Image (spheres, grey):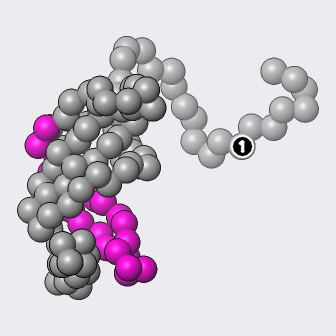
Amino acid sequence: MPESFQERRRMPRATVAGGHALQMPLSTTVQLVDISLGGVLLSSPQAVEPGKRATLQTSFGGQPVQAELEVCRVSPERAAAHAQGRFRVGARLVALGEADRRAVQRFLKADVS
């Protein structure tokens, strides 16, 4: 080590052998393809395991909406050249607050009109 190096650790460390895993929450930008009060279809740059839970944050009419999802199915996108390496993610809504539910309902009614 260079002579100018100053140790800042307060506790001694030891080298650890073997493989270890670190799980961290992953945040990624997705395209919301469609939505109902029961679920969503997303286009994602990353595959997600079915059964995994996630939080979707979006907005409708300027009102922020947050929904808890459970991934049901994942398949590679095949439609267009821009879809290469992307995945279709079907998920069910497992938790949606009352204000969030009303925002989705207003969006769905406006889309049908």
Look at the picture and state if 108 lies above or below 53.
Answer: below
Looking at numbered disc 1 in the image, what kind of residue is underneath it?
A: Arg
**Residue picked out by circle 1:** 8
State whether the magenta stretch is mostly helix, strand or loop: strand
Q: Locate the N terminus by quadrant.
A: top right
**Within the magenta stretch, is there residue 66?**
yes
Q: Which residues are magenta?
A: 54-73
Look at the picture and state if 61 lies above or below 7.
Answer: below
Residue 20's x, y, as percent?
36, 24
| Residue for point 51% across, 21% down | 15
Residue 55's x, y, as percent?
28, 59
How many discs appear? 1
| Residue for point 17% across, 45% down | 90
Q: Locate the C terminus by quadrant.
A: bottom left
Specify whether residue 78 is in view.
yes
**Within the magenta stretch, is there residue 101?**
no
Residue sitting farthest toward the right: 4
Residue 70's x, y, as percent?
15, 51
